[in-house]
Image (cartoon, helix red, strand yellow):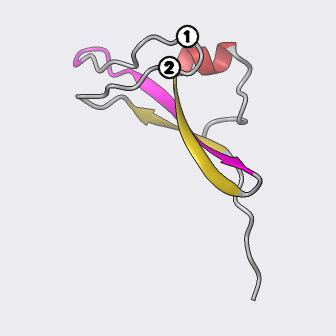
Amino acid sequence: MTTKTLGTRAVTRPVEAGSTTACAACGLPVKFKAKARLTQVIANVYVDGHWDRVEHYHSECYETVGQPYGSAA
């Protein structure tokens, strides 16, 4: 039996209504705006092969901080 070690990865998703998360880069809320159709980057962060946390970023902030978890899918 083989075990797959999971690694941190990032994906781009639309910001959903009712979102109450803060951007990991700038600290400001990642807020839904009906007419703007904003996107966010969500990263599942793994430490030593085990899930540790989820980080949310404004798409622009993720680019500004140098894509710390690689290119978002």
Which residue in the structure is indicated by mark 2? 23
Numbered tag placed on residue 63 in the rendering: none
Q: In which quarter of the view is residue 25 placed? A: top right
Residue drawn at 62 percent across, 36 percent down: 72
Place of residue 69 in the rendered image (x, y in percent of width and height, measured from the top left) = 71, 35
Image-based side of 27 in relation to 25, left or right: left
Image quadrant where residue 4 sits: bottom right
| Point 31% across, 15% down: residue | 36
Residue 8's spot in the image, x, y percent?
A: 68, 46
How would you classify the magenta stretch by its main secondary structure?
strand
CA–CA distance in space, label 2 to label 1: 6 Å
| Whether residue 51 is situated above or below residue 34 in the rendered picture | below
Give residue 5's quadrant in the image: bottom right
Kind of residue sitting beneath label 2: Cys
The secondary structure type at the circle numbered 2 is loop
Q: Left or right: where does residue 53 sit relative to residue 3?
A: left
Query: For the point 77% across and 82% down, which residue is it?
Result: 2
Q: What range is drawn magenta here? A: 34-47
Near mark 1 (Cα within 10 A), the count class, few <14, some 14-19 or many ≥20, is few
Q: Nearer the viewer, residue 28 or 33?
A: 28
Q: Residue furthest bottom?
A: 1
To which residue does mark 1 refer? 26
**Is the residue under label 1 in contact with that under label 2 (CB below 8 Å)?**
yes
